[in-house]
Amino acid sequence: MLRTELLVAVRATLVTLIGVGLAYPLVTTGVAGAIFPLQAAGSLVSDDSGNVVGSGLIAQAFGKAGYLQPRPSAAGEKGYDAAGSSGSNLGPTSKALHERAAKDLQRLLQENPNAEGPVPAELVTASASGLDPHLSPAAALWQAPRIARARNIDEARVRTIIEANIEGRDLLVLGEPRVNVLLVNRALDRHFGRLPLATR
């Protein structure tokens, strides 16, 4: 009796292991690769030479004035570490969060003296993952004067690039309109020339 039950349990375990542990992942990976090859490969973004410069799903630091800058990151020791994706877990009463936000606010005001209106809140607050690749259109357009000055071009041309890269709501109702920082920076390079990259 025990031997029969043991054989049934082993067979059920093997069938489950093969079906759920091997067959299902292979089939879903194959279907995803066939239907959505770019997304299945990590939404990698390449430069004009074909070199991968990042992923459209993961934020990275852009410190040069001629580039759109993303939200701050608490992922990893220096931020923007895809292996250390996490929030800072600092609450609204945290002194460390207040000091970091104040420092970022001061830096943004110094780097963007011609920007109109107050600094958008998302430019001084990290996302939950620390790797959000998007900004709201308002936060992206707020940076346009600095980018135009650094690239020595008319601000309207920068605004046109940003507005052309606004992504709408998913399925017309989910989420908010947004701008992918890496894709906008690639578009700026294509239209106005590449700047040497540097992180803050």
Image (spheres, rainbow, N blue to C red):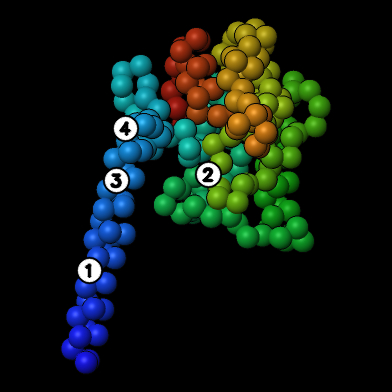
Crowding at mark 4 (Cα within 10 Å: few <14, some 14-19, many 20+): few
Number of numbered discs visible in the structure rendering: 4
Q: Are marks 1 and 4 in contact (CB under 8 Å)?
A: no
Residue 131 marker: 2
Which amino acid, mark 1? Leu
Q: Are marks 3 and 2 in contact (CB under 8 Å)?
A: no
Alpha carbon separation for disc pair 1 and 3: 18 Å
Look at 58% across and 20% down and name the residue there: 165
Helix, strand or loop status at disc 3: helix
Which amino acid, mark 2? Leu
Alpha carbon separation for disc pair 1 and 2: 39 Å
| In this picture, residue 16 sits left or right of residue 131 | left
Q: Check disc 1 and report the residue beneath it.
A: 14
Determine the residue located farthest toward the right in the rendered image.
Answer: 117
Which amino acid, mark 4? Ala
Residue 104 at x, y = what percent? Answer: 67, 42
| In this picture, residue 77 sits left or right of residue 21 | right
Q: Earlier in the sequence, mark 1 or mark 2?
A: 1
Nearest-to-viewer mark from 3 and 2: 3
Q: Earlier in the sequence, mark 1 or mark 4?
A: 1
Alpha carbon separation for disc pair 2 and 4: 27 Å
